[in-house]
């Protein structure tokens, strides 16, 4: 058929007719590429590919580019004809203008007659490239790029060609192969030749997947150019999305391949997929589903055929079905049992189709309920449930609504824990109550009608094989009613209600609180009996009194039962009858015991059973009474629990068994829940943590009894005896006897301390046990360079044991050696090439140090180990830094040595490194001489000298044959020779000859005692040559000189890299000095090398080969953080120091190394040479940026490739080196890439990437640059675009995975979502969206501020083996890893934070994992068992607010579902922390908010109730207990001070002490001062000291601890205590928990006074002023009767705390005492405090806006919380009530009228304030003079009143001061009460008065805070002192910190 020539069809369309107009653009100039990335979101991403191809082909084929853009314009016009989408009109206009510009200019450049011919020509060209080169994958890089380009361009051109062909010829174009974008596996037929597709395991998995033999025939399965597989069948049957199918297809192939290769041995390896691999996946994927079916009493719908050949196919289908459900489930992935429900029904349908089953109800073949239409599963299954989740989350009101008003993910998921869930049916009944989202009394109540037809259709699926029937009942009722009209009912909460109350702590940990309360009661009883020994408790009378604690226990049980009913009341609708019955019965039983036990006890006391002296029998001796019998019955359940506790296997079986008997036995003790069962540990673990807590509690109770309780018993008795009749105020309860108020004031803080100090004891025992554990596991063994050098020789053998896969015979040998395996096996198992492998790895580590600029070029040479053939014989040429100065030391030793040779040799051999240095130097010199000397005569002489030396060594006569005193001269000449050789300048030939002659003379004349033999050789040769000279007539040449045109030496050396390296190393050996022993200089490099070396001696599993290792993924959630610092960011800043300047100052050595690597002198040199990009990377790798994280994580891939190379390398390959072999062998390189791809995947879950790209955000370009730099990096993001359907615009959301191809992002998978994914907390939703694109069996979660190191990446194989190396019955589900905080060197605050965090992530988690068994997941670099967690809800929880600390809930969930968490310290990952006080405080506040929400959560409740007692203690004190105890310690101080205030103001303390002195009772004052030890919280820092001691040495630890105190570490930690206590307490009471971004700034900056006040006003300043006021009042009124020493003992720590809370933010504020900053801060403060607030005005601009925002938590509080707030505010009225009676004007009048008159004064003050306010409103604008006169009159009136009162009523100046102390707290209390009742008074004038008063108080507090700071700023020494303690770390490193603090001014 002849070619059809047509005009451009584009000109014939109406939409683009304007394109025919000509332009005046010049033909010669090539236009700029059209921006292909700024495509509006509403148009989708497919248009972008045409624009990209147009830009790519434009230089060669401009007409093709034009046609591609025409096609793109048409697509845009079709998608949005009227340009209604955002940005569409602008895009189409710009594209149209470009088309008009290019139309004429491009038509002249086409090479064919028509556009159609041009398109065919270019398409054919690229198609030929694919056909020719796709068969061979071993291509050069340039050919690979061409092939990649062709695969990218050809499909696009084909689509354009199709469009033009269809326009010209309706028959269209013949089918052709289209390249399909792929992620890891190119599954189209063109990708079969790629290396990864050649792997046998991939082929086996692919063959199994494509086995569709025996499946039902499907007409719709037509896949051009590809094979049909099982996933295509599932897609056709159930209507899954194409992107989801492609994604999960690759996912399953990789899982099958990795399992197959790991299970198949070399001998039995086949291309057929083994059943073991499939069975293992079946077990992992369906373990949770199987448990769910058993729990609900249903049959599994996974049914396999009896024929073994077909069973594998069925298994793969079931796994594929689950993966497809999971991959498309979107937010439903947080609901694992909901997915089980969906799978349960779809698996039944799948089995029915596979077997052709017929429904017994409809007598039709079983078919999928929703059909197989495109997106059927999404629209019919996922979307309805998603809408429920979305609507329920909307009721959350951004965290402000009460948790009980909406259902979170857990509530919705837990509905599927009940058999009632099957009433939803299949197809799902959308009129079911589950889908009702509003209570029935709501105006949005829904009425729905269900038809009989729909009912009958459902019955066909529910009656039989669906599994809805229990195993024993074939006709179970489905429970579906026949009502045609019914009102939907909101189900409400399921199983649990998150109630905001402090009672949740008691309810969850009731056993602990009961234990402590009963213990306190017992200790007080024992102290009252004056017990000196614990054995006295068995005295009959004492014992009976102590037994009274069980009455208290019964009362506490009643309280617990009441709380259970009250807190679960709103979940009663979803509870079954038996659960409700149990709660009622528990209350009844508890109340019965509260009656029985007291009655029996009273009867026993009345009969005086234990007072009888006649013990005729053993019951009499043991005082057996009716009460004792009742207690025995009462404790029966506890006895049973104790027995089961000691036999964990039995208790676990009872809990997890579904048999009726076990369910009855466990009904009373545990709720019938799917999780929280069978969490028992093994008996050994139970014994370990039980002993831990027994020791701890014994110490705690001994201390409490001896120092807290017993000392107060005597004084309490005295206080009760002393009668106080006169008070200093009007006593409200004068008839109360025994001074009860004083006793309460004294005992209250002691009781609080009793409940709190267990936390302190935990810190002490954590220190002891964690330290011992660390020592036993070799932590810190190699902590210095000296230790590293001394043990370096053992590193190769340790490396071989840990990191080199062992052979089969070694595996057999190791099985019998379990005790000290590493110590005794290293040498015996060393393979011949293991040293060479160690050298390869070591050199790669050192090279990575150089690339990271941790070392310079010289250090690189000093630390590199040369690759030589001797390595295979075990001889290692150690790095030069080990041999530094060893050779010169040996020379000096030999020069001065006197004695025999053997003694000298023995002395040298004693130092192994010295011996190696001497031997290597000799061999190097010998090699150089052999290479350098080429003349015959010279060779004979050189070899003669060398032979003489070697013969002397053999005869042990070296000292006799040679004069060693001349060695230094020879040494200097050798150095001179080697320097000339290194320089290699051919013009220095004569110098080399001269040096050789000098060496010859020194050796023969000065050193050799008998040099005649050598000279004879010379003379004999000269004589022969002399004869020749007489004949020829030429003079005799000199030794080593040219002889008749023939050179005697070969100089310069040939271009031999190996030889040059050896000469350079020889030069270093000769010249290096002692300073080289301190290599590397960089502290970070030292730390990393030391830790890597130490880790090789730790206990870690043996590494498998890369091909056999577990596959894993890394995922990083990303939002809007920095990707890379831009050039503008580096060099400019408005308020702070430029980042570049800051980095170069903080990291001076790394900056110098970077300049050396870039071969530049300074920053200007970098700019002039165009190395700005390298500069950006250097700075970004030192901040907390995404690029730093990605670089670190991609080290995994680099390490795996190197290890795969070592697994398969031969000796020759090892000698060449990894880098050389990989570059030179494309086949090997492709194979290594394939293995790395199969084992490792890195996905960044970046939800905002699509919108960033559309808006031109530079962050998007930064992410794209990362994908280009790391081709295996993948980015998952959410696309949001608008679509017009029926003239209505609605948003469509899709999850998209992209990779970088040819400099652009290429879409790999697109999966449509049911709606916006961000329903709950942002980070877990982000992780959930991206997790479907991860691969492998393990998943590592990495935050955006983390880093990784190459040397640590080498150990990832070992860590993954922990999942397989388990000595317990179940494998671990989470592997905890160690972290290193890399931000500790920035400032002192960063140092404190670093040590605090380090102690938690090391010694803290070490103890949590073993022995306590309560480690969870803390957002750190933990490794998850991926398949365990994706089938159980994911790697975090996402419900709004309650899951604010989302990471820890993954650990809770894993533990509740019978997983367990381990911790391993042989691998570390870097992590950044905040470096400024404000950032740190925001972080602490966020964590405290998260812990308060954890307190209310069902996870903590279930863990606390289901753990055994001791494990429950561990859980409490390591999670919420730490924060609650911090709150208790602060409350304790308040209770103590207000108790003292009561004693002082009432006169009780004065009367008691005066009467005590009269009665000579000395213990009373001591008792009143005994609360000073409340500040023992300093002991909580002990774990930090222990960890520093382990890793850096205990002397260093002590030094650092002392230094930290000088740098005000105590101030920082005390301030942090206030942050934790404030936010934890306020959040539990009022809510308001939210994510607080800290910014993670890299620059330390000055925070303004206003910012500090806003951040700390309510959390610290107000509380600090309150404590200060309490201390001042206490000091004023105790002086007359109490000694100053007692006052100091009582209050010193509280003074410290109050001053810390007031001034710490300013002490830790850089340049906080700079006078210029002080002035600016004062101006800013006044502007802020006076600025009016309003809509749109931010809180940093106006005090009013900030004040309103600060009360946000109160606006949404419940009634009870508001009442508590009002009650707490009443404490401020105590000051007024007590102080007014101490005024001189009151004249000792104790009448209540005095207090009433004080309120009159307060109201008068309020009236004055209101009068001034009204006067300002009426007169200040127009009658300013009148307003001034009015204020003057008021002032004079107040002054006259004061003067009159002083004259008439004896008002004194002291009275004025006391009035201020009395009325100021009252005013503040009134403000707090007004804020609590704001809804009632907001519309009245009272609220405006409240606002004015609050503003005045804030201004006053600010002024009081500002005054001392301003005064101190006058003294320069204060600013210098502040700088020193803030940046002491920088001063220690000799950094210039002043320029940084000077900021912008300094730079300008």
Image: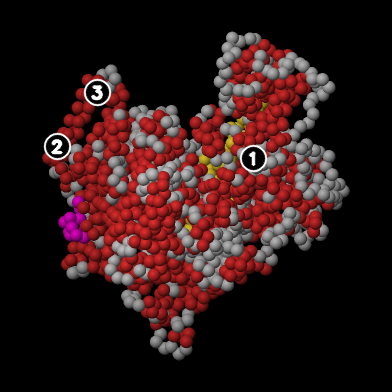
Point out residue 1105 in the picture as x, y percentages from the top left corner.
Answer: 60, 57
Q: Indicate which disc, 2 or 1, sits on the residue closer to the N terminus.
A: 1
| Position of residue 1575 in the picture relative to residue 70 (left or right) | left
Q: Secondary structure at mark 2?
A: helix
Judge whether residue 133 is colored magenta: no
Spatial CA span between label 3 and label 2: 24 Å
Disc 2 marks which residue?
1843
Does 755 sit above or below residue 97?
below
| Position of residue 359 in the picture relative to residue 1710 (left or right) | right
- Select label 2 or label 1 by which is in front: 1
Point out residue 874 in the picture as x, y percentages from the top left corner.
Answer: 50, 62
* Label ID, residue 1827: 3
Nearer to me, 97 or 621: 97
Spatial CA span between label 3 and label 1: 92 Å
Nearer to me, 199 or 442: 199
Q: Secondary structure at mark 3?
A: helix
Which quadrant does the C terminus fall into?
Answer: top left
| Position of residue 1326 in the picture relative to residue 1664 (left or right) | right
| Residue under the image location 70 percent in, 25 percent down | 122
Q: Indicate which disc, 3 or 2, sits on the residue closer to the N terminus.
A: 3
Q: Secondary structure at mark 1?
A: loop
Disc 1 marks which residue?
139
| Residue under the image location 55 percent in, 31 percent down | 1253
- Select label 3 or label 1 by which is in front: 1
* Label ID, residue 1445: none
Could you tell me if residue 1375 is visible in this image? no
Judge whether residue 1686 is colored magenta: yes
Residue 3 found in image quarter: top right
Nearer to me, 1612 or 338: 1612
- Select label 3 or label 2 by which is in front: 3
Q: Contact, CB < 8 Å: mark 2 with mark 1?
A: no
Magenta residues, start to end: 1676-1687
């Amino acid at each position: 058929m002849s070619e059809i020539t047509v005009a451009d069809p584009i000109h014939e369309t109406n939409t683009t007719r304007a394109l025919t107009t000509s332009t005046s653009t010049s033909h010669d100039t090539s236009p700029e590429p059209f921006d292909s990335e700024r495509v509006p979101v509403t148009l989708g991403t497919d248009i972008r590919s045409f624009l990209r191809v147009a830009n790519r082909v434009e230089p060669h084929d401009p007409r093709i580019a034009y046609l591609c853009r025409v096609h793109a314009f048409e697509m845009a016009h079709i998608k949005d004809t009227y340009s209604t989408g955002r940005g569409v009109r602008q895009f189409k206009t710009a594209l149209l203008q470009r088309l008009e510009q290019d139309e004429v200019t491009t038509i002249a450049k086409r090479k064919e007659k028509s556009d159609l011919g041009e398109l065919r020509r270019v398409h054919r060209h690229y198609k030929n490239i694919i056909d020719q080169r796709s068969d061979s994958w071993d291509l050069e890089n340039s050919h690979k790029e061409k092939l990649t380009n062709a695969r990218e361009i050809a499909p696009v051109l084909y689509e354009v060609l199709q469009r033009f062909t269809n326009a010209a010829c309706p028959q269209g174009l013949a089918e052709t192969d289209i390249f399909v974008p792929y992620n890891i596996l190119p599954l189209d037929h063109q990708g079969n030749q790629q290396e990864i597709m050649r792997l046998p395991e991939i082929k086996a998995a692919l063959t199994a997947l494509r086995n569709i033999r025996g499946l039902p025939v499907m007409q719709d399965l037509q896949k051009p150019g590809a094979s049909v597989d099982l996933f295509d069948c599932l897609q056709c049957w159930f209507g899954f999305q194409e992107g989801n199918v492609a994604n999960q297809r690759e996912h399953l192939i990789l899982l099958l391949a990795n399992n197959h290769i790991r299970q198949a041995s070399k001998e039995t390896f086949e291309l057929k997929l083994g059943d073991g691999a499939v069975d293992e996946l079946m077990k992992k994927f369906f373990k949770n589903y199987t448990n769910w079916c058993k729990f609900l009493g249903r049959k599994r719908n996974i049914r396999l055929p009896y024929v073994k050949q077909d069973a594998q196919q069925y298994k793969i289908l079931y796994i594929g079905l689950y993966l497809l459900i999971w991959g498309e489930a979107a937010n439903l992935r947080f609901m694992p049992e909901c997915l089980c429900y969906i799978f349960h029904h779809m698996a039944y349908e799948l089995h029915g189709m596979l077997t052709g089953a017929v429904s017994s109800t409809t007598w039709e073949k079983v078919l999928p309920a929703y059909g197989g239409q495109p997106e059927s599963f999404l629209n019919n299954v996922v979307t309805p449930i998603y809408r429920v989740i979305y609507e329920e989350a909307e009721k959350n009101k951004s965290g402000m609504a009460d948790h009980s008003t909406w259902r979170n993910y857990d509530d919705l998921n837990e509905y599927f824990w009940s058999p009632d869930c099957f009433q939803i049916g299949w197809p799902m009944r959308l009129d079911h109550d589950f889908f009702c989202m509003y209570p029935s009394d709501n105006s949005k109540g829904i009425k729905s009608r269900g038809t009989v037809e729909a009912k009958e259709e459902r019955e066909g699926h529910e009656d039989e094989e669906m599994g809805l029937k229990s195993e024993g009942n074939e006709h179970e009722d489905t429970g579906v009613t026949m009502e045609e009209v019914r009102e939907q009912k909101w189900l409400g909460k399921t199983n649990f209600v998150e109630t905001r109350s402090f009672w949740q702590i008691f309810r969850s940990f009731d056993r602990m609180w009961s234990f402590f309360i009963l213990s306190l009661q017992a200790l007080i009883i024992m102290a009252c009996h004056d017990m000196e020994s614990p054995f006295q408790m068995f005295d009959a009378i004492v014992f009976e009194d102590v037994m009274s604690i069980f009455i208290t226990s019964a009362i506490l049980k009643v309280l617990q039962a009441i709380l259970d009913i009250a807190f679960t009341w709103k979940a009663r609708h979803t509870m079954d009858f038996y659960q409700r019955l149990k709660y009622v019965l528990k209350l009844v039983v508890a109340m019965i015991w509260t009656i029985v036990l007291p009655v029996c006890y009273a009867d026993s006391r009345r009969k005086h059973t234990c007072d009888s002296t006649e013990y005729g029998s053993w019951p009499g001796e043991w005082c057996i009474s009716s009460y004792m019998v009742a207690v025995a019955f009462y404790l029966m359940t506890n006895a049973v629990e104790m027995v089961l506790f000691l036999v964990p296997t039995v208790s676990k079986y009872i809990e997890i068994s579904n048999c009726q008997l076990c369910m009855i036995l466990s009904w009373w003790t545990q709720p019938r829940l799917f999780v929280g069962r069978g969490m028992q540990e093994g008996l050994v673990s139970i014994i370990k943590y039980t002993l831990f807590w027994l020791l701890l509690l014994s110490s705690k109770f001994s201390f409490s009894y001896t120092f807290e309780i017993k000392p107060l018993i005597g004084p309490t008795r005295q206080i009760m005896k002393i009668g106080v009749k006169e008070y200093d105020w009007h006593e409200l309860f004068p008839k109360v006897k025994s001074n009860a108020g004083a006793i309460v004031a004294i005992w209250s803080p002691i009781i609080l301390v009793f409940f709190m100090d267990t936390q302190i004891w935990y810190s002490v025992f954590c220190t002891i046990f964690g330290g011992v554990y660390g020592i036993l596991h070799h932590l810190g063994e190699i902590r210095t360079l000296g230790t590293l050098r001394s043990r370096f020789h053992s590193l190769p053998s340790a490396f071989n044991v840990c990191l080199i896969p062992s052979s089969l015979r070694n595996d057999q040998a190791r099985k019998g050696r379990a005790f000290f395996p590493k110590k005794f096996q290293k040498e015996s198992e060393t393979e011949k090439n293991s040293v060479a492998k160690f050298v390869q790895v070591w050199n790669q580590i050192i090279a990575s140090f150089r690339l990271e600029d941790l070392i310079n070029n010289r250090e690189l040479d000093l630390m590199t180990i040369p690759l030589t053939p001797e390595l295979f014989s075990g001889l290692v040429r150690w790095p030069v830094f080990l041999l530094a100065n060893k050779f010169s030391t040996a020379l000096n030793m030999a020069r001065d040595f006197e004695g025999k040779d053997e003694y000298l040799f023995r002395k040298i051999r004693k130092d192994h490194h010295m011996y190696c240095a001497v031997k290597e130097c000799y061999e190097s010199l010998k090699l150089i001489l052999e290479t350098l000397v080429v003349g015959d005569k010279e060779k004979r002489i050189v070899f003669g000298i060398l032979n003489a030396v070697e013969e002397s060594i053999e005869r042990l006569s070296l000292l006799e044959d040679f004069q060693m005193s001349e060695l230094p001269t020879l040494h200097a000449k050798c150095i001179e020779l080697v320097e000339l050789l290194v320089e290699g300048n051919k013009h220095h030939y004569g110098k080399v000859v001269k040096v050789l002659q000098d060496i010859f003379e020194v050796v023969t004349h000065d050193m050799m005692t008998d040099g005649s033999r050598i000279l004879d050789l010379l003379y004999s040769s000269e004589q022969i040559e002399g004869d020749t000279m007489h004949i020829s007539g030429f003079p005799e040449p000199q030794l080593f000189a040219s002889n008749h045109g023939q050179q005697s030496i070969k100089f310069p050396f040939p271009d031999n890299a190996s030889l040059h390296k050896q000469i350079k190393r020889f030069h270093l050996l000769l010249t290096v000095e002692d300073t080289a022993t301190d290599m590397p200089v960089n502290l970070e490099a030292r730390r990393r090398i030391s830790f890597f070396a130490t880790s090789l001696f730790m206990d870690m599993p043996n590494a498998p080969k890369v091909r056999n290792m577990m596959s894993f993924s890394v995922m990083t959630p990303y939002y809007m953080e920095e990707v890379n610092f831009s050039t503008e960011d580096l060099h400019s800043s408005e308020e702070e120091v430029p980042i570049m300047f800051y980095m170069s100052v903080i990291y001076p050595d790394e900056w110098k190394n970077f300049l050396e690597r870039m071969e530049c002198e300074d920053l200007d040199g970098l700019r002039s040479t165009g190395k700005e990009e390298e500069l950006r990377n250097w700075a970004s790798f030192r901040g907390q940026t995404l690029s730093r994280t990605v670089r670190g994580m991609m080290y995994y891939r680099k390490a795996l490739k190197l290890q795969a190379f070592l697994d398969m390398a031969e000796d020759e390959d090892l000698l060449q080196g990894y880098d050389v072999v990989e570059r030179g062998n494309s086949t090997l390189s492709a194979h290594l890439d394939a293995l790395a791809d199969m084992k490792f995947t890195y996905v960044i879950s970046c939800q905002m990437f699509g919108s960033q790209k559309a808006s031109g955000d530079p962050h998007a370009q930064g992410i794209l640059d990362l994908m280009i730099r790391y081709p295996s990096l993948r980015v998952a993001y959410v696309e949001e675009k608008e679509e017009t359907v029926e003239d209505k615009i609605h948003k469509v959301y899709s999850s998209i995975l992209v990779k970088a191809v040819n400099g652009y992002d290429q879409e790999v998978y697109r999966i449509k979502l049911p709606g916006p994914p961000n329903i709950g907390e942002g980070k877990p939703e982000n992780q959930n969206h991206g997790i479907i694109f991860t691969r492998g069996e393990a998943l590592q979660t990495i935050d955006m501020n983390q880093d990784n190191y190459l040397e640590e990446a080498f150990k990832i194989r070992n860590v993954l083996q922990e999942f397989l190396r388990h000595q317990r019955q179940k494998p671990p589900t989470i592997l905890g890893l160690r972290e290193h905080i890399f931000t500790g060197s920035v400032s002192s605050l960063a140092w404190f934070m670093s040590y605090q965090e380090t102690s938690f992530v090391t010694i803290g988690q070490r103890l949590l994992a073993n022995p306590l068994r309560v480690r969870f997941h803390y957002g750190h670099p933990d490794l998850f068992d991926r398949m365990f967690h994706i089938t159980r809800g994911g790697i975090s929880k996402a419900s709004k607010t309650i899951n604010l600390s989302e990471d820890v809930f993954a650990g809770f969930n894993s533990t509740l579902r019978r997983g367990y968490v381990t911790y391993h310290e042989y691998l570390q990952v870097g992590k950044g922390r905040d470096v400024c006080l404000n950032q740190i405080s925001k972080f602490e506040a966020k964590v405290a908010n998260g812990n308060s929400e954890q307190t209310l959560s069902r996870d903590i409740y279930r863990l606390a109730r289901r753990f055994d007692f001791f494990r429950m203690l561990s859980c409490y004190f390591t999670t919420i207990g730490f924060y609650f105890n911090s709150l208790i310690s602060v409350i304790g101080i308040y209770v103590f001070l207000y108790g003292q205030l009561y004693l002082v103001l009432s006169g009780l303390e004065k009367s008691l002490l005066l009467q005590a002195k009269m009665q000579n009772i000395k213990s009373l004052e001591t008792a009143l001062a005994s609360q000073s030890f409340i500040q023992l919280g300093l002991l909580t820092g002990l774990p930090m000291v222990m960890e520093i001691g382990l890793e850096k040495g205990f002397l260093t630890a002590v030094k650092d601890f002392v230094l930290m105190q000088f740098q005000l570490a105590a101030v920082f930690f005390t301030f942090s205590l206030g942050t934790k206590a404030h936010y934890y307490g306020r959040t539990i009471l009022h809510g308001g928990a939210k994510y607080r971004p800290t910014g993670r700034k890299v620059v330390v900056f000055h925070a303004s006074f206003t910012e500090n006040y806003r951040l700390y006003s309510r959390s610290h300043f107000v509380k600090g002023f309150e404590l200060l006021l309490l201390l001042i009042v206490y000091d004023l009124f105790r002086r007359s009767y109490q000694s100053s020493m007692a006052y100091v003992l009582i209050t010193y720590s509280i003074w410290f705390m109050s001053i810390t809370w007031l001034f710490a933010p300013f002490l830790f504020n850089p340049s906080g005492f700079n006078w210029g900053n002080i002035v600016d801060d004062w101006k800013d403060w006044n502007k802020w405090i006076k600025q009016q607030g309003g809509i749109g005005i931010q809180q940093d601009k106006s005090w009013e806006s900030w004040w309103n925002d600060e009360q946000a938590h109160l606006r949404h509080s419940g009634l009870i919380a508001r009442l508590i707030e009002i009650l707490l505010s009443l404490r401020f009225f105590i000051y007024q009530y007590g102080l007014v009676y101490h005024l001189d004007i009151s004249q000792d009048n104790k009448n209540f009228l005095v207090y009433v008159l004080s309120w009159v004064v307060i109201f008068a003050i309020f009236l004055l304030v209101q009068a001034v306010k009204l006067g300002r409103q009426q007169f200040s604008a127009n009658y300013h003079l009148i307003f001034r006169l009015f204020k003057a009159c008021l002032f004079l009136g107040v002054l006259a009143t004061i003067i009159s009162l002083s004259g008439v009523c004896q008002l004194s100046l002291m009275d004025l001061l006391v009035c201020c102390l009395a009325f100021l707290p009252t005013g503040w209390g009134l403000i707090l009460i007004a804020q609590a009742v704001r809804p009632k008074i907001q519309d009245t004038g009272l609220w405006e008065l409240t606002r004015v008063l609050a503003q005045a108080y804030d201004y006053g507090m600010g002024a009081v805070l500002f005054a001392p700071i301003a005064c101190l700023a006058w003294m320069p020494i204060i600013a210098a002192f502040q700088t020193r303690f803030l940046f002491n770390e920088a001063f220690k490193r000799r950094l210039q910190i002043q320029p940084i603090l000077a900021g912008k001014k300094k730079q300008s």
